[in-house]
């Protein structure tokens, strides 16, 4: 997808809206247009699944490859590779919404500078789950693999590698279990900010340990400060495979897609150029369904 309409409005590679039980399976979606995410989930799309697919973003603009908007319902991304090479922003941006996002066996690769949201995955949606992901996303020194600002989120298994910190946690009630992570900067792979509360971290390997700034201290057991490079099955090599409209105001606009303000987690905890990881989540939204709860990702 590499065109705009006569009014200069960017097309979306795949726009999912106004329906339920919608599945995109075995698709290859690519974008090279500024302010035009490859996949855009919005406008009352509920129970959406992106499965066994490849999503690529190449643009001279800060933007996500996949954008899950506030108006979207439950959204799942599974067995999918996201290749993100833009001038900034997240590879996957998950805005606040009433239903969770579920990512399972997803691989994210690429590079982007610190321009807008600095994390490969930015999650602002409560009750979301990240299962067995493989994230190796770099760029400038402030890049991160995953930033979470939402409540009751589960990060289970997977391998996370980036620059400043691999994972930045600013949520409440988050469970991080059986995760391997490394920051290429030599910083602690996991940073828990002063906004975080009631965080549990167990059975995980964080290179250079955990930088905990939370007021209540995280609950932890059986964690190591040695990176173990993850599991060879992390990411979309797992085996659970699985069987248009130009938009109006709000949904098609470019504001909020690159996460340029208040998206990435707490200011004042990084001590650097922070402040773009903010906790409120701004106005983005995205969504999916069709993933079993329970066995694969234990809850507390």
Image (tube, helix red, strand yellow):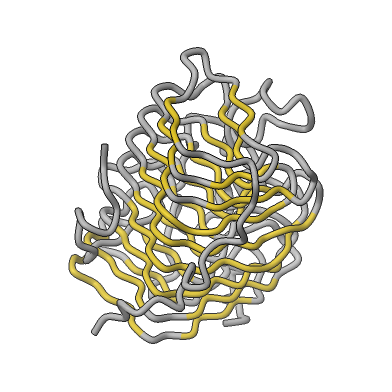
Please provide percent x and percent y for residue 73: 26, 53
Compared to residue 4, the image places residue 132 above or below, namely: above
Pick the front one: 131 or 57: 131
Compared to residue 102, the image places residue 142 above or below, namely: above
Pick the front one: 125 or 262: 125
| Relative side of 181 to 223, left or right | right
Compared to residue 29, the image places residue 59 above or below, namely: above
Q: Quadrant of the C terminus?
A: top left
Please provide percent x and percent y for residue 41: 38, 62
Please provide percent x and percent y for residue 234: 48, 67
- Dividing the picture into quadrants, the one containing residue 112 is bottom right
Q: Residue at x 41, y 32 (%)?
A: 200
Pick the front one: 29 or 165: 165
| Relative side of 201 to 62, left or right | left
Compared to residue 205, the image places residue 280 above or below, namely: above
Task: Count the numbered circles shown.
Answer: 0
| Relative side of 18 to 250, left or right | left
Please provide percent x and percent y for residue 255: 58, 48
Q: Quadrant of the N terminus?
A: bottom right
Q: Residue at x 51, y 21 (%)?
A: 195
- Dividing the picture into quadrants, the one containing residue 98 is top left
| Relative side of 37 to 164, left or right | left
Pick the front one: 180 or 45: 180
Q: Residue at x 42, y 58 (%)?
A: 248
């Amino acid at each position: 997808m590499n065109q705009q309409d006569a009014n200069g409005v960017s097309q979306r590679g795949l726009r999912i809206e106004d329906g339920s039980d919608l599945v995109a399976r075995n698709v290859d979606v690519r974008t090279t247009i500024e302010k035009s995410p490859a996949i855009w989930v919005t406008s009352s799309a509920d129970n959406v699944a992106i499965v066994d697919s490849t999503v690529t973003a190449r643009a001279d603009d800060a933007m996500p490859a996949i954008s899950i908007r506030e108006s979207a319902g439950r959204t799942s991304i599974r067995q999918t590779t996201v290749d993100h090479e833009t001038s900034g922003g997240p590879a996957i941006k998950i805005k606040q919404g009433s239903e969770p996002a579920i990512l399972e066996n997803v691989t994210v690769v690429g590079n982007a500078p610190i321009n807008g949201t600095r994390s490969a995955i930015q999650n602002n949606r409560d009750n979301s789950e990240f299962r067995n992901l493989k994230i190796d996303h770099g760029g400038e020194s402030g890049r991160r693999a995953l930033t979470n600002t939402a409540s009751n989120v589960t990060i289970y298994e997977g391998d996370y590698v980036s620059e400043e910190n691999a994972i930045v946690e600013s949520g409440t009630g988050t469970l991080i279990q059986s995760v391997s992570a490394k920051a290429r900067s030599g910083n602690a792979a996991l940073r828990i900010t002063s906004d975080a509360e009631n965080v549990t971290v167990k059975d995980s390997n964080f290179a250079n340990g955990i930088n905990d700034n939370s007021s209540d201290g995280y609950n932890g057991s059986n964690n190591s400060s040695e990176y173990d490079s993850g599991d060879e099955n992390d990411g979309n090599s797992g085996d659970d495979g699985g069987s248009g409209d130009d938009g109006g105001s709000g949904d098609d606009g470019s504001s909020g897609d690159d996460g340029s303000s208040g998206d990435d987690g707490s200011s004042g905890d990084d001590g650097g150029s922070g402040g773009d990881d903010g906790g409120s989540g701004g106005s983005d939204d995205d969504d999916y369904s069709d993933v079993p709860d329970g066995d694969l990702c234990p809850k507390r």
